[in-house]
């Protein structure tokens, strides 16, 4: 499927897609030096279940 077709499908969809930036931005907070990869991995099942359109890591 071409990029143009993918873009058109997104434009034709009446739904709003939500991008989660928690895992990207969390490392700019107080937890940045204390949060391990294992801690972040523990949240993935719930994040996946939430059904976000995209994730930024």
Image (tube, grey):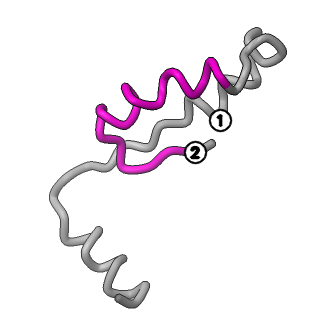
Residue at 57%, 28% (x, y): give it: 41
In the picture, residue 3 is in which quadrant?
bottom left
Q: Could you tell me which residue is drawn at 36 percent across and 77 percent down? A: 7
Q: Residue at x 30, y 33 (%)?
A: 49
Residue range of the region highlighted in magenta in the rendering: 38-56
Q: Position of residue 33 (x, y in %)?
A: 84, 15
Horizontal and vertical percent position of residue 23: 60, 31
Check contact, mark 1 vs mark 2: CB within 8 A.
yes
Left or right relative to 29: residue 4: left
Q: Earlier in the sequence, mark 1 or mark 2?
A: 1
Provide the residue designation for mark 1. 24
Q: Is residue 27 left or right of residue 5?
A: right
Q: Give the CA separation, mark 1 to mark 2.
A: 6 Å
Left or right, residue 11 beside residue 33: left
Report the residue marked by disc 2: 56
- Residue placed most toward the observer, 34 or 53: 34
User: Looking at the picture, does residue 53 appear above or below residue 9?
Assistant: above
């Amino acid at each position: 499927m071409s990029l143009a077709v993918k873009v058109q499908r997104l434009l034709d969809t009446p739904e709003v897609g939500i991008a989660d930036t928690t895992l990207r931005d969390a490392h700019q907070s107080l937890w940045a030096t204390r949060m391990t990869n294992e801690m972040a991995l523990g949240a993935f099942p719930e994040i996946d279940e939430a059904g976000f359109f995209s994730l930024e890591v």
